[in-house]
Image: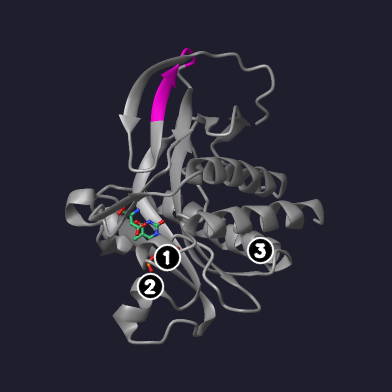
Amino acid sequence: MKAEGIKMEKLAQRYEGKAKKVYDTTDHNYYWIEYKDDATAFNGQKRGTIEAKGVVNNKMSALLFEYLENNGIETHFVKLLSDREQIVRRLDMIPLEIVVRNVVAGSLSQRVGKEEGYVLKKPVFELYYKDDELGDPMVNDSHALALGWATRRQLDDMQDMALRVNELMRALWEKAGITLVDYKLEFGVWEGHVLLGDEISPDTCRFWDRETGEKLDKDRFRRDLGNVEEAYAEVYRRLREALDNV
Ligand code: TMP
Ligand code: ASP
């Protein structure tokens, strides 16, 4: 699904989310995305700005989607336009967040009473129903099927893709000297099949330095740890270095 030759213009804003703005384009099949510096946590209760976050998240997502595409994962990514803008395919979004965990942290640590840093014996996959008013409750396959959010086939495709993404991402981040602790993925349907959508960035992943354990992700903002901008810049720098050596 190569994008060369696609010509389109930016039209009216369709939607403004917590971290991105979405615009229609002259081609109905695509969206024009603009990444912002706005940061929220705890379902929007904590708000702030992380300077240049939009630039890092836009460019990091583009690099990671390209890496995944090159390794057989279909994504919505089409083309990087500028520091903050990219073109993506217009997916029919499945209203679920898939969280993949390799190491215990965050809400899993609280839910099961296990210390952050415990290395899981196998990856954990969790589903959350995307609904801000409900605070994105955790659900399971049977909810998703019974409530009509996804078909069995789509859930299986999402699970298979998440597993492959995890193998590819872990290998890449290891080269960057980073432990990929956990992260969140979103999927949507394009021409009848499931594609990976949304973003992959320090907003949606937990990255820990392999040597020091230092947190290099949005937990620095969530937990008021300081040096937030520096962490985003560092993790992006290390990703580019790792990709040069793939
Ligand atoms: P959690 O430990 O808070 O459940 O988060 C698990 C992972 O999912 C972590 O890498 C952050 C990411 N995440 C999001 O991208 N968006 C969200 O709204 C939440 C709650 C988590
Ligand atoms: N993105 C979510 C929110 O706004 C949660 C988070 O990343 O912690 O509120």
**Residue underneath mark 2:** 106
Q: Residue furthest right?
A: 245
Q: Which mark is residue 173?
A: 3
Question: For the residue with label 2, is its CB less than 8 Å from the closest atom of ligand 1?
Answer: yes
Query: Which SS class for mark 1?
Result: helix
Q: Percent x, y for residue 40?
A: 32, 52
Q: Nearer the viewer, mark 2 or mark 1?
A: 1
The foreground one among 168 and 189 is 168
Q: Is residue 79 visible?
A: yes
Q: Position of residue 48 (x, y in %)?
A: 33, 50
Whichever of labels 2 and 1 marks the residue nearer the N terminus, that label is 2
Res. 74 in view: no
Do residues under tags 2 and 1 come within 8 Å of each other at their CB atoms? Answer: yes
Which residue sits at x=64%, y=66%? 170
Amino acid type assigned to the residue bearing label 3 in the image: Trp
On the image, which quarter does residue 80 sit in? top right
Check contact, mark 3 vs mark 2: CB within 8 A.
no
Local packing at callout 2 (Cα closer than 10 Å; few below 14, some 14-19, many 20+) is: some
Ligand 2, image quadrant it occupies: bottom left
Give the main secondary structure of the magenta stretch. Answer: strand
- Report the residue marked by disc 1: 219
Q: Secondary structure at mark 3?
A: helix
What is the span of residues highlighted in magenta in the rendered image?
A: 22-27
Q: Which quadrant of the figure has residue 97?
A: bottom left
Tally the numbered discs: 3
Q: Earlier in the sequence, mark 3 or mark 1?
A: 3
191 w.r.t. 177: above or below: above
